[in-house]
Image: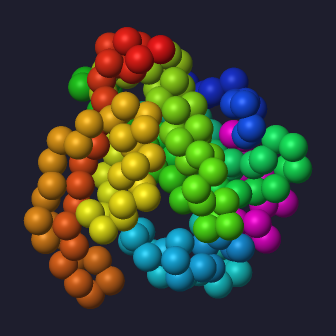
Amino acid sequence: MLMPFSPAFPIRTDRLILRPFTHDDLEGLNAIQSLPEVARYVYWEPRDLDESAKALEIRIGQTTLTEEKQPITVAVELAGTGELIGDAMLFWQSEQHRSAEVGYVFHPRHHGRGYATETVAALLELGFDGMDLHRIFGRIDARNDASARVLERVGMRREAHLVENEMVKGEWTDEVVYAILQREWRARR
């Protein structure tokens, strides 16, 4: 992969636009991040407006990869309305192993419509075709059945179930790892 790497934004899917975050996204991002059901399976607690503003500042700068251990973060908006409905990232893990991690959160009002699946598929395409990655994985809380279904729908296989491997929000949690290889992704298309 040639460095630095920056996607050709916006990334368009059938129903969505994946684009860099802007300062105008604060209200929409906080509408997502302030919800307990959104924060349930992630490392952070529901965020107030100031906490979302700090998170937004970080996201605004995450549009180009210059070294390992950096994410590209995208705002996910509905193409028809421009409404911000989610937050997703492709986190470059290793140049040597050509690997990255995918992650996402969506407003619950938009769950069950395939938007997360559509977003993850676009990020897999970005990673495999744009960055020539070998392997992309997703790590989820084992209780998050909906997220497991998203990763399975894009062709990822369940590779590991780590029992009580992390202390999250005061409790031991299990983690499940899903992954897909570049050749498997291309064979599906």
User: In the image, is 159 to the left or to the right of 71?
Assistant: left
- Please tell me in which quadrant of the rendered image residue 159 appears: top left
Q: How many numbered marks have been drawn onto this rendered protein structure?
A: 0
User: Where residue 50 sits: x, y (%)?
Assistant: 68, 81
User: Residue 145 occupies which quadrant of the picture?
Assistant: bottom left
Please state if 82 lies on the left or on the right of 138 as rendered: right
The location of residue 104, given as percent across then percent down, is: 51, 53
Q: Residue at x 74, y 38 (%)?
A: 15
Q: Which residues are magenta?
A: 18-29
Vertical position of residue 97 compared to residue 120: above or below: above
Task: Return the x and y of residue 88 as percentages of the image width and height.
Answer: 56, 49
Question: Is there any visible trace of residue 91 in the rendered image?
Answer: no
**Which of 2 and 136 lies nearest the eye of the viewer?**
136
Residue 66, placed above or below residue 61: above
Splitting the image into 4 quarters, where does residue 85 fall? Answer: bottom right
Q: Would you say 39 lies left or right of 134 here?
A: right
Residue at image location 58% in from the left, 40% down from the top:
119
The foreground one among 175 and 2 is: 175
Residue at the left extreme of this rendering: 163
Residue 25 in magenta stretch: yes
